[in-house]
Amino acid sequence: MPPTVVIEGTGKPTSRVLVDRIHSIICNRVEDGAEQYLVRWKTDLPTEYAPLSWQSLGELARCLEYVQDYLESRAKSISSKTNLVHLSKKRKSPDTVLEHERRPSPIARHLQSSRTPSVERLNLGDSSPKVYNGILDSENGFIVARASPSSNTVFIKTKNAPTPKMLIESHNAKTDLADAWIRTEYTRRLGKIPGKPVHLINTMDTSTPSLRFRYISECVLREGVYMADTDSQVGCRRCTPHMGRDIGCEYTKTCDCLEYAAVDESRLTAEHMKQWNAFQAGKGDTIGMPKKFPYFAKSTKVRRAGTLVPFYLNSRRPIYECNDRCRCGRFCRNKNVQFGRTVELEIFKTTDGRGWGLRCKQDLYEGQFIDTYRGEIITDAEATRREEQAASKTKASYMYSLDKFQKSEGLPDEEIYVVDGEFMGGPIKFMNHSCEPNCRQYTIHYNKHDYRVYDIALFACRDIPAGEELLFDYIDPEPDEDEDGDENETKEIVEPGEGAVPCLCGAPKCRKWLWT
Ligand SMILES: C[S@@+](CC[C@H](N)C(=O)[O-])C[C@H]1O[C@@H](n2cnc3c(N)ncnc32)[C@H](O)[C@@H]1O
């Protein structure tokens, strides 16, 4: 058997806890001025007697997500139980809370019959046990807990822990160090995101966004999700890096990447009409018809290079960028989102109950690209499974359906993929909804027209001063669904469905619910 770890009473870490052995953290206390957390360990034995032990924060440095989960449920429980504690004036007899410790169950009595001394007695030398139901061992420098074969072990039924006495102690115990460590760990992870810095600001409370989240630069495809192979990518063949203005692609008629881009109907002439009518009837294509590049090119005087041209800005038209196989070169005017975020962002805690929000540290121009909405791309069935599994129907949702082409391609619901940004993604995960937003989402393709998998990019839809919250419309209804009729007409309020979340955007034209 590996040597026993002696956890010193000073609370100083002697080792780290092996993360995959932890089941959960169920209580906290302060011992000799140091914060300690009661770990419930995973066990192969009946969970009724799973080993429990008090660990210092230093020992839990690699499992702060468990500490964070615990602190979140503790905060909820404190706010919901505060009233109960105040209302219940009944006194308890002094020993009640220790009842189950004094009268072990049959299984406990059986285990206690062994003669081996238990670790917690060695470590503590006082009446406050450090380990329950087990012993602590070290394994490759990590602490693990095992069910105890020994006598003298203090047994408590796991479901009785934390005991009422522990709970009362925990509610009064400070958790400042844990809060600070969790914040530092999150900030460390933010510091590793490539590109311009992303900051975290919270002037409201001590919480930090969930550590059960990984920042990624590319979406992760999950089981059952397929996207067009990049080997099948065809770049534009007739464009070059220097076609006159050194901006790569210059003529929409020659750029093959615009094959599926929207036609600029205002520039259709008589010679286009036969092709256009055929296309409208579902035949042929729009190659050679008038189109627009999505971004202003450098050397454009009026607007900033890279911002959306009005043809796209004032629409929901899909964007088709050039790709690595194109002949137009690295600096083509038709490449933008693929290079990633170039603006400095700040995740902040909102003051009105919408959780975290996102803002930019610098002024944004109308049409400026901010970042993409990333996450795991999952099937519709998996998205439904995750939604059903979610503890609460009103909890924050990070799912984004890739259903832009559902109607045009005749895709059934079950073939639609979904981006889930809850556990991995980018800072855009924190963008809240507004019924009158300052940003808008666009679909971006680099590989011609894969209508199931594409990027979702967020752009400013007006000039946004530094520090203003970035918001987009989660529904983004097509103008004809939403904007006909009188400007001042009162909107019909749609009755909410199950799990609908009241919208707190406060816009004059608020639709009142996030999802209906
Ligand atoms: C993609 S998340 C946005 C980030 C989120 N606020 C957080 O703290 O992680 C979407 C969730 O934010 C909240 N939310 C966003 N916009 C809101 C609004 N206008 N009113 C109320 N809640 C909103 C809802 O809980 C929603 O499910």
Image (spheres, grey):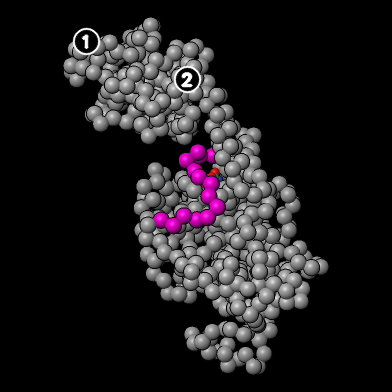
Q: Looking at this view, is 436 or 255 the one in front?
A: 255
Q: Looking at this view, is 312 or 142 the one in front?
A: 142
Question: Which amino acid type is shown beneath numbered disc 2?
Answer: Pro
Circle 1 SS class: loop
Residue drawn at the location 64% of the way across and 38% of the way down: 201
For the record, the magenta segment spans: 209-222
Question: Which amino acid type is shown beneath numbered disc 1?
Answer: Arg
**Residue, disc 2:** 13
Residue drawn at the location 37% of the way across and 57% of the way down: 223
- Rendered position, 45 above or below 478: above
Q: Is residue 509 left or right of residue 250?
A: left
Residue drawn at the location 49% of the way across and 23% of the way down: 58
Q: Determine which quarter of the picture holds residue 338.
A: bottom right
Can residue 14 be seen here? The reply is: yes
**Residue, disc 1:** 115
Residue drawn at the location 62% of the way across and 43% of the way down: 347
- In percent of width and height, residue 141 lies at 41, 25
Circle 2 SS class: loop
- Rendered position, 239 above or below 146: below
Can residue 484 be seen here? The reply is: no
